[in-house]
């Protein structure tokens, strides 16, 4: 019994030592945390919020030039943030202009991404409804060399974010399409850089939010409330990028004319961008007297493309005038035909050669199109007028 008691005493002593060590260790942890740890501050809906939107330079294709659009960010307030009693959280309450919109959606949960997209589409439909006079609650324009747009002094709530061309009117930046099996209207907006078109889908933004956990920024997450989505927390505008297209005008002057025989002139137009042929076609003009005609190829050729316009047929009795050229090149600039600085023009001049010959022409028309299985060149012929034959 005596030996057994000693073993018990030895075991009890060991337990006390372990317990004391654990208390001391816990004390060290508490002491260490006590100097730095603090409880997260409770939600403050009286505090203003801020938002930065990334508009970094992008390229349409690998190796292409990176460009940044001339963009403005409009924010439309869709719902107020209302404190949930007994919880460190808030819910949404739609404002009058969006009274019919269901804003009872979870904040930041990835499985509800489609719901957020649908609500954004519905909110955009309200903003851009025919006859709507709703204006943004906040707007900011990207500075020339900046890659961020910042909006500050925002009340907490749910916002519709609409990026759009900074110098465009609504009818120019707004794109309406139908999408999905239900044929619902899809509203998108555009902005332009020198060579690209940036297309955006409106997004819903909740302010404030909380630090993300596993990529999800939900109000139920632990941690601090984030009132300023700036810097590392800035949101991305996520545009789709496409080529920007411009107008090309072919001017033709016929200074002399052989009476009684229509004069037809044919031009080939070929555009190359990054060593790829991006447009190829033929156009014709028919004169029944001296004068000037123009043919406009509108919004077909990408900005930056090198265009070669060749007069391949000058009529049976005409020749290129002195000082004119049979082949001309144009580098496409981003201007439309109605602008004062429009320079995408190839000009040709012809004179009668005195031969008395008559003739007509057929125009080959090529169009790059999708046949349902891929992009192909489609070829058709447009016969010109034959002298003495009625149309």
Image: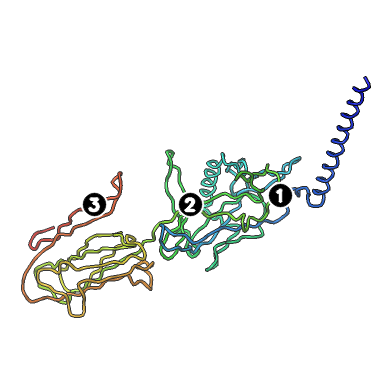
Residue most extreme to the top: 1
Give the image location of residue 271, x and y in percent.
29, 63
Residue at the spot of label 2: 130
Q: Residues within 10 Å of mark 2 (few under 14, many from 20)?
A: few
> Do the residues under discs 2 and 1 have CB atoms within 8 angstroms?
no
Q: Residue at x 49, y 62 (%)?
A: 57
Marks 3/1: CA–CA distance: 60 Å
Residue 242 lies, with reference to residue 27, above or below; the image says: below
For label 3, the crowd category at 10 Å Cα-Cα, with few meaning under 14, some 14 to 19 and many 20 or more, is few
Going from N to C along the chain, the mark reached first, 3 or 1, is 1
Which numbered mark, 3 or 1, is in the foreground of this view?
1
- Label 2 sits on a secondary structure element that is loop
- On residue 376, the disc is none
- Residue holding disc 3: 378
Question: On the image, which quarter does residue 65 sit in?
Answer: bottom left
Residue 310: x and y in percent read 21, 68
Q: Does residue 68 appear left or right of residue 11 in this picture?
A: left
Considering depth in this image, is 137 or 61 the residue closer to the camera?
61
For the residue labelled by badge 1, is the local secondary structure a helix, a strand or a loop?
loop
């Amino acid at each position: 019994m005596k030996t057994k008691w000693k073993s018990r005493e030895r075991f009890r002593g060991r337990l006390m030592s372990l317990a004391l060590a654990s208390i001391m260790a816990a004390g060290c942890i508490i002491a260490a945390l006590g100097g730095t740890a603090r409880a997260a501050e409770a939600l403050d809906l009286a505090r203003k919020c801020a938002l930065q939107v990334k508009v970094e330079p992008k390229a349409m294709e690998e190796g292409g030039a990176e460009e940044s659009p001339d963009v403005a960010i409009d924010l439309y307030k869709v719902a107020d943030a209302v404190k949930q009693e007994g919880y460190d959280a808030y819910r949404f309450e739609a404002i009058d202009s969006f009274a019919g919109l269901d804003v009872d959606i979870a904040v930041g949960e990835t499985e509800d991404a489609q719901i957020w997209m649908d609500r954004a589409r519905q909110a955009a439909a309200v903003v851009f409804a025919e006859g709507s006079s709703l204006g943004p609650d906040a707007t900011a324009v990207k500075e020339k060399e900046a890659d961020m747009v910042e909006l500050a002094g925002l009340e907490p709530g749910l916002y519709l974010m609409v990026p759009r061309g900074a110098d465009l009117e609504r009818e120019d930046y707004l794109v309406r399409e139908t999408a999905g099996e239900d044929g619902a209207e899809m509203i998108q907006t555009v902005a332009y850089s020198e060579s690209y078109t940036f297309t955006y889908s409106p997004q819903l933004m909740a302010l404030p939010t909380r630090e993300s956990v596993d990529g999800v920024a939900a109000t139920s997450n632990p941690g601090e409330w984030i009132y300023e989505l700036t810097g590392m927390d800035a949101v991305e505008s996520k545009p789709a990028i496409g080529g920007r297209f411009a107008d090309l005008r072919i001017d033709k002057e016929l200074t002399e004319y052989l009476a009684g025989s229509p004069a037809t002139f044919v031009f080939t137009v070929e555009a190359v961008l990054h060593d790829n042929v991006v447009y190829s076609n033929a156009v014709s003009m028919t004169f029944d007297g001296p004068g000037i005609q123009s043919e406009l190829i509108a919004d077909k050729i990408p900005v930056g493309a090198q265009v070669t316009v060749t007069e391949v047929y000058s009529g049976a009795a005409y020749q290129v005038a002195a000082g004119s050229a049979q082949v001309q090149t144009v580098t496409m600039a981003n201007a439309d035909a109605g602008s004062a600085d429009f320079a995408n023009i190839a000009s040709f001049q012809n004179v009668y050669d005195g031969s008395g010959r008559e003739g007509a022409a057929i125009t080959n028309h090529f169009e790059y199109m999708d046949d349902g299985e891929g992009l192909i060149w489609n070829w058709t012929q447009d016969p010109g007028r034959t002298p003495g034959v009625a149309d």
